[in-house]
Amino acid sequence: MRHIALLLLVMPALAGEIYQYTDANGSKVYTDRPPPGAAKRTDIKQNVIDTSGGNFLVREAMRKHPVVMWATPDCGPLCESGKAFLLKNGIQYAFRNPQASQADQTAFAQVVPDRVVPVLQVGSTVLRGFDPDQWRATLDQAGYPHTVDPTIKAGPAAVAPASGQAKKGQGQ
């Protein structure tokens, strides 16, 4: 533990200063040694890749094709199977109850006119009822992986009630 603390103290010193200048050939030069003449010192920031919240492919699938499950509390085994399927496959989704408010009822009617639950939205694709093969194929097409990403919290994500502005096939 003591060695790790020492290493963390030394690391910034190892980074040193970075200088940038243009050489006689007109090329930009980056170096850790002071350049000849009156070259400008440049602060170079570290490249950081955010790995929290899934790998790039998962984050892109979530951004481009958000998953919304529409269901009611009294939906029964089909809805419970759908929730279990999404959880088992590591899918983060918005859970929407069309009975929660008038705005949710209106938004749901725009997605599915016959108002039958469960309904799964994956981006602009709307699936009525629970069919695990159809759900998996749609998630595959949207880019969701078959393996569970441990950095994604699977299950329902917090979602605000509908504003009544939902468009058919669009998740909130």
Image: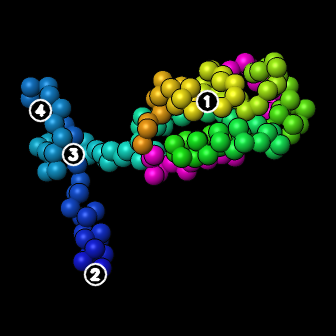
Q: Are marks 3 and 4 in contact (CB under 8 Å)?
A: no
Query: Which is more N-terminal, label 1 or label 3?
Result: 3
The magenta stretch is 148-170
Query: Which is more N-terminal, label 3 or label 2?
Result: 2
On the image, numbered disc 4 is attached to which residue?
23
Left-right relation of 59 to 95: left
Q: Residues within 10 Å of mark 2 (few under 14, many from 20)?
A: few
- Calculate the distance from the C-alpha at mark 3 to the C-alpha at mark 4: 12 Å
On the image, numbered disc 3 is attached to which residue?
19
- In front: mark 3 or mark 1? 1
On the image, numbered disc 2 is attached to which residue?
2
Q: Are marks 2 and 3 in contact (CB under 8 Å)?
A: no
Q: Provide the major secondary structure of the magenta segment.
A: loop
Query: Which is more N-terminal, label 4 or label 1?
Result: 4
Left-right relation of 10 to 153: left
- In front: mark 2 or mark 3? 2
Left-right relation of 127 to 49: right
- Calculate the distance from the C-alpha at mark 2 to the C-alpha at mark 1: 55 Å
Q: Position of residue 84 (x, y in %)?
A: 61, 46
- In front: mark 2 or mark 1? 1
Q: Which mark is residue 131?
A: 1
- Calculate the distance from the C-alpha at mark 2 to the C-alpha at mark 3: 33 Å
Q: Position of residue 77 (x, y in %)?
A: 72, 42
Q: Quadrant of the N terminus?
A: bottom left
